[in-house]
Image (tube, rainbow, N blue to C red):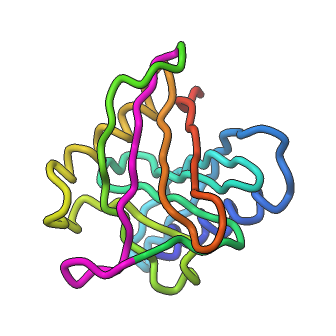
Amino acid sequence: MKKVLLSIMMLMAAMTAGAQDGRWERHAVEGDELKGTESTTSYVYVQEGMGGFVFWQNDDSRFCIVSPKVMFNTMVSNGDTGTLAIVGFYDSDGNMKEKINLWMTLETNSGYHRLFAIDRYNNPLIKNHKKNIKKVLEAVKQGDGYVRILTGRYQTDDFDLKIPPFKE
């Protein structure tokens, strides 16, 4: 959990540092053999004013979106606090190929600023939740267009982030 928080803290710092357009960043997260944690790498897409998207190396079970200073709208469904997000998959010409819904779980200690799509949290409102998370991650890692994530934020514009594929 600490490596997740470290990745997110680096994301928040990057968002406040100020980028003109979105950019990908790579962050090494050291493991700790005493604690039983492995080293990993987090990949962060940041767009100033809008927020960011985070995924982790060798982890196809989750990703996170972050909103700087503005809280996400949330609700309680099936005992879990979170929100529904609309995800669009676009080709390189900007044409939408597919649209899906995802349940995104609120990280409770984030002040309503971080939402996770986690495959173990199934919500009866969403079909194929686990498969859809993998689909988002595959598009971000190997796609040729972009992924767009849209969800509501409290008393301001929606969170609307276009995430191009990560290229090493």
Q: Residue 117's quadrant in the figure?
A: bottom left
**Magenta stretch bounds:** 75-92
Residue displayed at 37% across by 73% down: 82
Residue displayed at 71% across by 65% down: 12
Q: Nearer the viewer, residue 58 or 123?
A: 123
Asked if residue 21 is positioned above or below residue 98 in the image, the reply reads below
Q: Is residue 91 left or right of residue 158?
A: left
Asked if residue 101 is positioned above or below residue 138 in the image, the reply reads below
- Tell which residue pokes out farthest to the top in this image: 93
Residue displayed at 41% across by 64% down: 116
Q: Nearer the viewer, residue 130 or 88?
A: 88
Residue displayed at 78% across by 38% down: 21
Return the x and y of residue 158 as percentages of the image width and height: 58, 57
Q: Main secondary structure of the magenta part?
A: strand
Asked if residue 33 is positioned above or below residue 136 in the image, the reply reads below
Whether residue 87 is in magenta: the answer is yes
Q: Quadrant of the C terminus?
A: top right
Q: Nearer the viewer, residue 156 or 31?
A: 156
Q: Quadrant of the N terminus?
A: bottom left
Return the x and y of residue 59 as percentages of the image width and height: 35, 50
Q: Is residue 69 left or right of residue 53?
A: right
Whether residue 2 is in magenta: the answer is no
Number of marks in the image?
Answer: 0
Asked if residue 153 is positioned above or below residue 143 in the image, the reply reads below
Return the x and y of residue 160 as percentages of the image width and height: 57, 49
